[in-house]
Image (tube, rainbow, N blue to C red):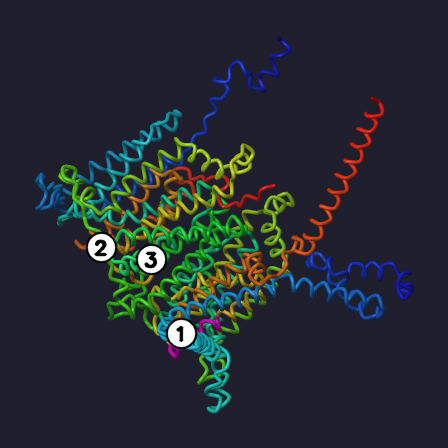
Amino acid sequence: MSDRTPDADDPIEAGHRHRDGAPDSDINPTVVHAPEVAEVAVAAPVATTDDRIVEQEDVWGSAFRRIMGGNLVMSVLAVLASLVVGGILIAATDERVQETSGYFFARPTDMLSAVWEAVFGAYSALFQGSILNVARADAGFAQLIKPLTDTLNFATPLIAAGLGVAIAFRVGLFNIGGRGQMLWAAAAAGWVGFSFELPPVLHLLVAIAVGILAGAIWGGIAGALKAFTGAHEVIVTIMLNFVALWFITWMLRTPGLLQAPGGNNPISPRMLDTAVLPPIFGPPFVLHWGFVLSIAAVVFAWWLIERSSLGFQFRAVGLNPNAALNAGMDVKRITVLAMLFAGGFMGLAGAQQVTGAVTTGFTAGIDAGIGFDAITVALLGGSTPWGTLAAGLLFGAFKAGGFRMQAAEGVPIDIVLVVQSFIVLFIAAPPLVRAMFGLPQPGRKSRRQRRDEAALAALEAKGAAAKAGTAQDARTERKGTGA
Amino acid sequence: MTTQQPIDAHTPAPSEPAALERAVVKHWKAPISYAVITVVAAILMVGLAREGDATLRLATASDFIQLPDAVMPVRATGGVVVLLLAALTALSFWATGTARRLGAWLPIAFGVLFVVGFLVWAGAGAMIPIPGLLFATVGLSVPLIFGAMGGVISERAGVVNIAIEAQLLGGAFTGAVVASATGSTIVGVLAAMVASVLVSMVLAVFAIRYLVEQVIVGVVLNVLVAGLTNFLYSSVLTANPALNSPTRLPRIRIPGLADIPIIGPAMFNQTIIVYAMYLVVPLIAWGLFKTTWGLRLRAIGEHPLAADTVGIRVNPLRFWNVSLAGAIAGLGGAYFTLDSNGAFTREMTAGLGYIALAAVIFGQWHPIKATAAALLFGFASALQQTLGAIGSPVPSEFMLMLPYVITILAVAGFIGQSRPPAASGKAYIKQ
């Protein structure tokens, strides 16, 4: 503390030091004026004191404790537990395992090795299909890391759509309408993409912007119904999904609307070359610039939620709409805006699908279940933009690896859905995961503590009983003497 | 007494509550909705009237009582229907304006008139087989009704049931596999119920024990069961087709009842699952509103704290009622593979669980109204199939959209009032 004395006679400096404290900086950054921030930044390096180091160590210590008891470890354990469940399913449906299980008690090693082969084979295929293709390492570096870029490719729409769910979550809204929002976005972006002839870069930008707008409008309908009639957004978005599905299906099979001319199938014409997201690296990699858009969307969502005044209102409404209302926020406007943004992120995912993933004409299945995957992505990501990015990458890896697992090991890709769902279930119920891994439950005392306390309580009870007993004895004695 | 006069003007005197409680809130949404529908009907049936006659076939060749075909002139029928709809709309405006209640007959009459007018308009120059239409309606409604009953019980108990889809799909899969493996269809039906109960129990455990947001559990369960059944279908059933060829339930014709004209063949020449439905729906309606079980069920869904205060064990009761809801939805699941289809296919419920949820909401969490809503939705898709066969003037996709649009209008308050049980979706934490 003695080192602070030179600063202490400068009251402004001292004040800033206090304002620099970690908890304060979280509240609302937009309230802090820019010049003050600059001064703080200058002031910070001046202090090189022991207590600051101690403070930092303390921060690290608490962070470590928070991580061990908190989200990251829970997420990792949830993923692990889900992979175990997936492994059990893979083993149980493996033919060799079924055969060998018939004589398990005669020769258990047969079945155990069959189980090992089935599960290890499937998960190593998952790894090689999503991270590094070790088997083709001799074919050059490009072949080795191609699965990694496939993962990024699959993660691209998952990240954008995950943001669409996450941002709604932060406002206390549940956006299950990803499918409808993506479908409208895909239809709108696709329509711009195949029916207008525009200069190369402009065409792509217009198509994606129109897609985002279409998704935002479809999301905004749910937000407006919630805000002005009180209709529950979960029901409305589910129903809007089906309305969108049938409407797009109708447009896709009606000549003159979205149907490719000269065909009878419900499929649109292929996109013009100017409306296709170009690959980042070129062959053999399929990764396109949509991934960069998704990263940009993550940064924008982070800025929107954590740094903008609108995002502050979003979070305030999400934490407590009544308090936000009392603080003078227009909760209805925030609800509509949140669903507009959520739909917009979904719209980006839909536009990426038609301009990046499937450019040869789209069907009503263009959403590819991403609208629902997005829910699991956002939940796993803790509804934060960076968490959504990480979760999107993980599920992208599952998808990329799942296809290889299906091709190489004959394990149906649907196992990926099962594993994803288990991850979300486990993440949503930390006490269950703690119980499975034998971790202590926070707020509940450990077994030893409980045993000690019980013993102590028993001792006390005994002591009290003994005391009462002696008192009684004394009383009877007194009675005796009195008699 | 004179000093008390001004106080009485502000606070209702206990002696004359009737005079002061007549504060009537007028809801104009219903008459306005009728007016909008009447205008739509006028545009369709008069403005865009089609030439010719529509033939409504009222009996099949095998029927006991042979009713003659009804031949309706399209223009005249359309005009009469629109006039009647306009009259009903005017009646509704008058009743709302003078704060009278008209009862349930008005929306029913309005709906029936609209449907008849629409059928005649759509069937111009063609023949519409009414018995076939009704038979398809019952068939398409059965899973919806069972699903909706599961939804009603679960939500009345305070647990939001988005997982109806998962319960139906799990029931359909298990029913097919167990019936094929054991060779007994009834065992298959029971297994379907058990599978749906298991799905429900997962929902209940996560919602009640682990306090997870119920909508999230429901959505995740839908994804999980879809993934699981797809996985098992691809990895087990395609390799062993013998596991996916259940014997279907036999049709049982009830003599006498099945000979009632028009509705008889559709309702009383069905399988045991359909007859079970005729029993289950009134039983639930009676139980929910007339028995101790129902009172407690509604209490824990409306105000769990009050229920707890009088000694009802809220969370165990919720758990078992959500499980019961699963058992009922499981019958709907069994219907897919053991009655209508005869084999399991990937994601064969195709979103019907969500339509059942829509029926629950549109039916205002009431078993009879939810059944009526499910029948309406079933009728809409049966109509879509029938019109598709005769060449519909309305794109079939718009007919398929109908249940969802109606539900959105219902939750937005344009049709009826949709108010869920007060504690639905909120976990109860015992103090």
Q: Amino acid at mark 3?
A: Thr
Q: Nearer the viewer, residue A263 or B107?
A: B107
Q: Amino acid at mark 2?
A: Arg
Q: Position of residue B324 (x, y in %)?
A: 40, 45
Residue that numbered label 3 is attached to: B174
- SS at mark 2 in the image: loop
- Main secondary structure along the magenta-highlighted residues: helix
Q: Which residues are magenta?
A: A396-409
Identify the image quadrant of residue A41.
Answer: bottom right
Residue that numbered label 2 is attached to: B248
**Inter-mark Cα distance, 1 to 2:** 40 Å
Relative side of A309 to B187, left or right: right
**Which residue does the image show at 91% across and 60% down from the upper left?**
A9
- Callout 1: chain: A
Q: How many marks?
A: 3
Q: Nearer the viewer, residue B148 or A182?
A: B148
Q: Is residue A400 above or below residue A380?
A: below
Which label's residue is closer to the chain start, 2 or 3? 3
Q: In this orientation, does residue A383 appear?
A: no
Residue that numbered label 1 is attached to: A106
- Tell me the crowding category of disc 2: few under 14, some 14 to 19, or many 20 or more residues within 10 angstroms, Cα based: many
Of badges 3 and 1, the one in the foreground is 1
Quarter containing the C terminus of chain A? top right
